[in-house]
Amino acid sequence: MTKKESVLNAMNNMPVDRPPVGFWFHFPVDMKTDSKCVDDHLDFYRRCDTDFIKIMCDGYFDYPNPIIPEIREPKDWYKMKPLGGSHPYIRGQVDRAKRIVERLNGECYTFYTVYNPMSIFRFGTSDSLLMSHLKQDPEAVLHALSVIAKDASLLCRLLIEEAGCDGIYYCVQNAENCRFTFEEYRKYVTPGDLAVLTAANTYSENNILHCCGWAGKKNRIEVWKDYPAKVINWAVYIEEMGLKEGKKFFGGRCVLGGFDNRPGGVLCSGTREEVEAFTAKWLEENDENGMMIGADCTLPAETDPDRIVWVMETVKKYRRVYNEQKKN
């Protein structure tokens, strides 16, 4: 079974000869040498031999809408308009993704990282400004979020149609228990979330929803339970919800994860024997269709890629044993 066959089968809850594997890092980017970021993605993929690539949006976190420096009070957000497809913020991401996809020449699936509108808002301003303005004039902030959603939706279309990505790795955030109630999240955040996710689903049916535990605090994960995506990835160790439990919670859809991405987790700090043993345990415990190996989130940049190789070698050994059992 090829990498693409394995990933597609897993995404559709069909049998595989072994669970697909994917991990990722943030790659430091000097925007003057963007070609290095392309090389870093491909070098990491080749070294670790993972089954798919999550292309990072490093260098494009800060949303550069020209109105932002002029914001003095919430009503100023009504002046904001979409950047449009020719803006370097969008054009640069599409061009980078296209170069990676072209060099892979169809070898594996690629998923590009896109954040939800509220997180893009935070990246372009600050968390404190977001929450302050949302309290003072929620409609003004909702206008800004709708504008950002148009840019992010356009980005999804171009990444899939022009760059050739197979889908979007869509990161939703801002659902920490201490930030919003369920009702507040669904009122203020969900409309933007779903606008972008709906756009991604229009151009590809193979999208991954990442329920991010970036703040290290439990989320109201139930706000994302009905979000339409083929694969769900969440912070297993922060939410204290294992893969099998989560698979049921998300309606039986394919799930991705199982490894703690934090520095103290076994993948980042364990011995080789511990990493291999943890991987073997994952394989033993997560034996249903529609389960993929990955981490709660992005691995620390200092993580030795050889640690991912240890995981891959254990998984490939499992495939050989599995195939021998089928023959017998």
Image (cartoon, grey):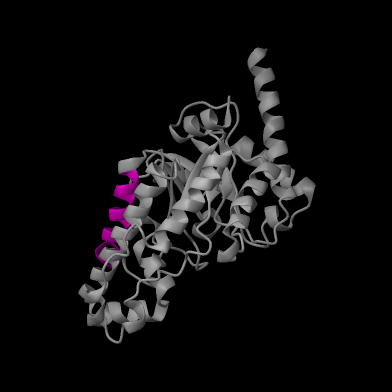
Q: Residue at x 44, y 41 (%)?
A: 164
Was residue 191 drawn as part of the magenta stretch in this picture? yes
| Residue 88 as seen in the image, left or right of residue 21 | left
Dominant secondary structure of the residues highlighted in magenta in the image: helix
Please provide percent x and percent y for residue 227.
33, 49
Image height check: is 110 above or below 177? above
**Viewer-proximal residue among 73 and 99:** 99
Residue farthest along the bottom direction in this orientation: 72
Image height check: is 240 above or below 65? above
Report the number of discs.
0
**Residue 177 sits in which quadrant?**
bottom left
Q: Quadrant of the C terminus?
A: top right
**Viewer-proximal residue among 297 and 71:** 71
Q: Residue at x 27, y 80 (%)?
A: 135
Was residue 323 drawn as part of the magenta stretch in this picture? no
Whether residue 21 appears in this view of the structure is: yes
| Residue 292 as seen in the image, left or right of residue 62 | right
What's the magenta region? 184-201
Q: Residue at x 42, y 57 (%)?
A: 91
| Residue 63 as seen in the image, left or right of residue 294 | left
Please provide percent x and percent y for residue 302.
70, 62
Whether residue 227 appears in this view of the structure is: no
**Residue 280 sits in which quadrant?**
top right
**Viewer-proximal residue among 208 and 319:** 208
Please provide percent x and percent y for residue 23.
60, 48
Image height check: is 41 above or below 187? above
Q: Quadrant of the N terminus?
A: top right
